[in-house]
Image (cartoon, rainbow, N blue to C red):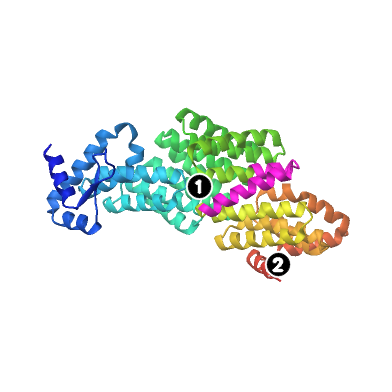
Amino acid sequence: MHVTSELLTLEEEGLVRRVEDNDLTYFFKHILTQETAYASLLLKERREWHRLIASTCETLFADNLNDYLPLLAHHFTEAGEYDKAVSYWYQYGERALQISAFPEALKAFQNALALLPNEPTSERAQVYAQLGELYCRHTDYDVAKENFRNALSTGIAARDAKTTATALTGIARIESQRGDHQQARELGEEALRWAKDANDIEAIAHAHRQLGVAYNYEGKNELAQEHLRAGLALYQQLNDREGISSCLNSLGVVARDEKKYELAHSYIEKALAISQELGDRYGVSVRLVNLGVIAEQRGDYQTAARCQDEALSISQEIGDREGAALIRLNLGSLALTRGDSDLAMQEYRQALSEARGLGLQALSLYIIAAIAKVQLALGNAEYAAELLGLAFHHPAGTADIKIDFDSVLQELNTKLSPEELNVAIERGEIMDLEHAARKLLEHIQA
């Protein structure tokens, strides 16, 4: 009653007002009044008020704390209860990352890191690992790798085998994207050893998933399926729906590479449904890209274009530059299928420029193989053969390049003599990737 009386007095004096007439929630009418009132409190008083607010919120909203994570994190921070503050900032960062709210996730993890002691602890290693994941999804691989390395060194020092395994898995993922497939596989195997030593099911699942992706890049699909199915079983045991979705998507990619399009479509549709339910925009975009590729390979160009356009919109919204490059590549393929070589070259140019800027060698090589197909359609058979020679034989290339562009090689066999074809391919094999990409971008632009 006393509080209500004081509030009514403040309301009569024009300092506060109710949110609604039948609501007991009030707010200050002017920000300066609020700041003056707050500044008048002693530090000890402020902390007590923040602690009271945070504790009250924990009690009132105990059944739905996810909606109040940043509020709780803020008040426990101001109350000086840093252990609780770190926990809530971390949970908020995880939630924001799951729905691709990257700025909010970054702020949350940075706040958590700032409150932790500057010494090797499991909590510090875990925050670094989450920052690595965040920057991976935002396609800033240099910063991602730096954070994963911090997670690795901190995890080892803290004797945290689980986070050490997670960090190794993250670095392996970056090496796969950059085309060092042997390094990616070796890191994945090391991650699996650490995860098994920790006897942590989640870390073991992560390592199996990454190894599955690495083996798929190398064209060793039996091993890829073995690891992906092992990861999927563990994620199902944990009821980790994001992990389940990721493994299903990767199994779909393997099935697509083996031209089992019905099976691939089934896997990825299930993965898409889970990502949509989770509100995972990054995951939704990836699944749509893969469904678009499958639709194109099945001859359903309208569905293919719709999937790629939807994915591009999401990628641009969340700042996924790698995803945008991949989608431009797929849109170029659709344009070429429809006979529009000019539009195909335009899309490929944008895709190559983005992939080159991100240092994505494997994707750059795939795009170069796609450009070879355009050059062949334009009558430039020898140049097309040179580009295929580079894409097929560069160590950063992936197995799907040869699978997807074998038809181009077969057609070149009808356009060039065996000697001409071999000489052109050999010229491509010794090309420098960076020089070739730069020349292609100049050529396409012209």
Q: In the rendering, at what x and y percent does residue 264 appear?
A: 66, 36
The vertical placement of 196 against 388, above or below, is above
Does the residue at mark 2 contact the one at mark 1 (Cβ under 8 Å)? no
According to the picture, the residue beneath numbered tag 1 turns out to be: 187
In what element is the residue under mark 1?
Answer: helix
According to the picture, the residue beneath numbered tag 2 turns out to be: 444
The vertical placement of 337 against 265, above or below, is below
In what element is the residue under mark 2?
Answer: helix
Q: What's under tag 2, amino acid-wise? A: Ile
Numbered disc in front, either 2 or 1: 2
* Viewer-side residue, 285 vs 410: 285
- Looking at the image, residue 193 sits to the left or right of residue 225; the answer is left
The residues colored magenta run 291-317
Q: What's under tag 1, amino acid-wise? A: Leu
Is 307 colored magenta in this rendering?
A: yes
Residue 202 appears in which quarter of the rendering? top left
Quadrant for the C terminus, please: bottom right
Other residues around mark 1 within 10 Å, as few (<14) / some (14–19) / many (≥20): many
* Labels in figure, total: 2
